[in-house]
Amino acid sequence: MARDNGNSNDYVRPIRRILIGGLVLFLLALFLFWRIDSPRAERLRAQITDRIVPTFDWILIPVTKAAGMIENFQSYTRIYDQNQELRRELQQMKAWKEAALQLEQQNAKLLDLNNVRLDPKLTYVTGVVLADSGSPFRQSLLLNIGQRDGIVDGWAATDGLGLVGRISGVGRNTSRVIMLSDSNSRIPVTIQPSGQRAILSGDNSVLPPIEFIESPELVRPGDRVVSSGDGGVFPADILVGHVAQDKDRRLRVRLAADYERLDFLRVLRAMPKEPLSDPGGLIGANSSAPQAAPPDADEGADG
Amino acid sequence: MAERTPTADRWVYGLAYVGLMSALTLLHIMPIEITRGALPAPDLLTSITFAWVLRRPQYVPTLLVALVFLVSDVLFMRPLGLWTALTVLAVEFLRRREANVRERTFPLEWAMVAGVLLAMTLANRLVLTVFLVNQAGLGLSILQMIITILAYPLVVLMSRFVLSVQKMTPGETDARGRPR
C-alpha cells in the first residue's frame, strides 16, 4: 500500500512491538498463575471483586429492583388467572398444613419420648444478591455478606425453601455462591424415599442431571432429592428439588429454589463436626492414657 | 469551545470508552435474569472495542483495552488473563489494518471482524482444552460468537450515529494516513 504506516518512525514500531509482546506475555503468565495456583488466584479475584462491586451497589440495587418491578407489572395482565390459581392452591395448602401440624406434634412427642437431641447449631445469615457472574458460561451470584459476617467457604446457601448453591470465594464484604446449575458444581444428594445416594452435577441448564445412581430403577420422577451431607461439606437433609426425566430418559432434578427470583439468600452456618480420631482406648489396655487425660481437661477448662 | 483539538478528542473519547465499558460490565453482572434463556447475550465489550479500533484507533490505546478486559475477566469469573491476551492480540492485528479498512466497504470489515472473533473463540477453547480447564459446551460458545458477529453492524451503527465515532476522513490524517 502506498500509504502504509510510516518510515519516519522506524524506531517506534519495534519498541511498540516489544511492549505489546511484554503485555501479552504478562497476561499469559497471569493465566498460567491462575491455572497453577487456582485457590490463590481465586482469592485474589474475590478480593478485587470485593473492592469493586460494593462501590457500585448504589446503582446495582435500584436498577435491579426497577427491572423486577417491570417484570412484576407485566404479570398484572394475568392477574385474574393467577388469583384463581392461588385460591385453589391455598385450599390444598390448608389441607397440607393441617396434616403437617398433626405430624409435627406427633414428631415432637416421639422425639421427647426417645430423648433425641437435635443439632442446635444450624443457624443462618441472610444476604442480598448484589450481582451475578455476567457470563452465560458461569452460574454464580455475589452476596453482600462476607468475612466480616463470619461467612466461610463451603457453606450452603438456600432461598428459604431449597438449596441454591455453596459459598466459593469469600471477600471481606462479599462472597460468591456457585449455583447448583454451574458446570463446576457437584453436590452429594440422597433421593427419597428409596435412599439412593447420587451426585448432582451442574451442566449450565436449569435442570441439572443426577449422576452415579446405583440402581436407577428405584428412582421415579417426582421423588424428593435432599442433600446427603456426605463428605462433611454440606449439612444433610436440605431440600434440593424433585426428580424429573428428560426426553433422553436421563434423570434430572427440578430445583426447589426459585432461580428466577433470587433476591435474598440464606447462608446456613455449618459447624464442622468434631472428628472422632481417637479410637477410645480400652480400659486398662494402655496405662498412660488415663494419666495424660487430666492435664488436657484442665487446659480446656482454663481456655 | 468551537473546535476541539485532536488531543482533547482523544481524552474525551478515551474516557467515554472507559465509561461505556464500565456501564456494560455492570449491566452484565446485574442479577436481572439469572437463569439464561436459550440465547446468550452478545459479547458487546469485544465488538465495541473492535468497532472503535477500526474507526479511531487513537481513542482506544492498547493498555486501556488490556485494563478494561482484565477487570471484566475478574468480574465475569473467566480464566484470568486469557481472553484479555487474545483481545490485545486481536486489537493490535486490527489496528495495523485500520488504514486499509478505511477505504473498503463495510461487508469486508464485517468479514474480517468475524474471522478475528472466530480465531479468538477457537484459540480460547484450544488453550483451555490444553490446560485441562473445565468448560461449558462448545455449542454455547459458538452460539455466542455467532450472536456477537450478527450484532456487530448494530454496534457500528450505534458508534457512528450516537457517539459519532466515524471512519477518519483524509482531512483528519497526515500525509502518511496516520491520525494527527
Image (spheres, coloured by chain):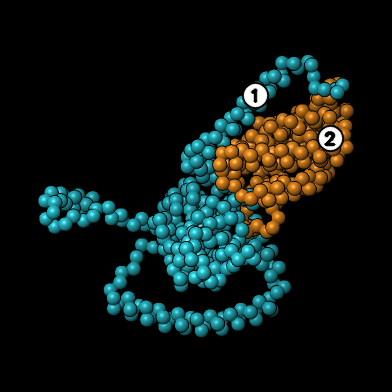
Chain colours: A cyan, B orange
Instruction: Report crowding for label 1: few under 14, some 14 to 19, many 20 or more residues within 10 A (C-alpha).
Output: few
User: Looking at the picture, how far across and down is residue A26, in whole percent?
Assistant: 58, 30
User: A148 or A29, which is in the foreground?
Assistant: A29
At 63% from the left and 64% from the top, the residue drawn is A248
| A74 lies left or right of A208 | right
Q: Chain of mark 1?
A: A
Give the image quarter of residue B32: bottom right
- Callout 1 secondary element: helix
Asked if residue A261 is positioned above or below residue A139 in the image, the reply reads below
At 64% from the left and 66% from the top, the residue drawn is A247
Asked if residue B36 is positioned above or below residue A95 in the image, the reply reads above
Label ID, residue A199? none
User: A94 or A127, which is in the foreground?
Assistant: A94
Mark 2: which amino acid?
Lys
> What residue is disc 1 on?
A19
Label ID, residue B167? 2
User: Looking at the picture, how far across and down is residue A227, in whole percent?
Assistant: 46, 63
Q: Is residue A113 visible?
A: yes
Q: Is residue A269 visible?
A: no
Mark 1: which amino acid?
Leu
User: Looking at the picture, how far across and down is residue A182, in whole percent?
Assistant: 56, 54
Q: Chain of mark 2?
A: B
- Callout 2 secondary element: loop
User: Looking at the picture, how far across and down is residue B121, in whole percent?
Assistant: 68, 41
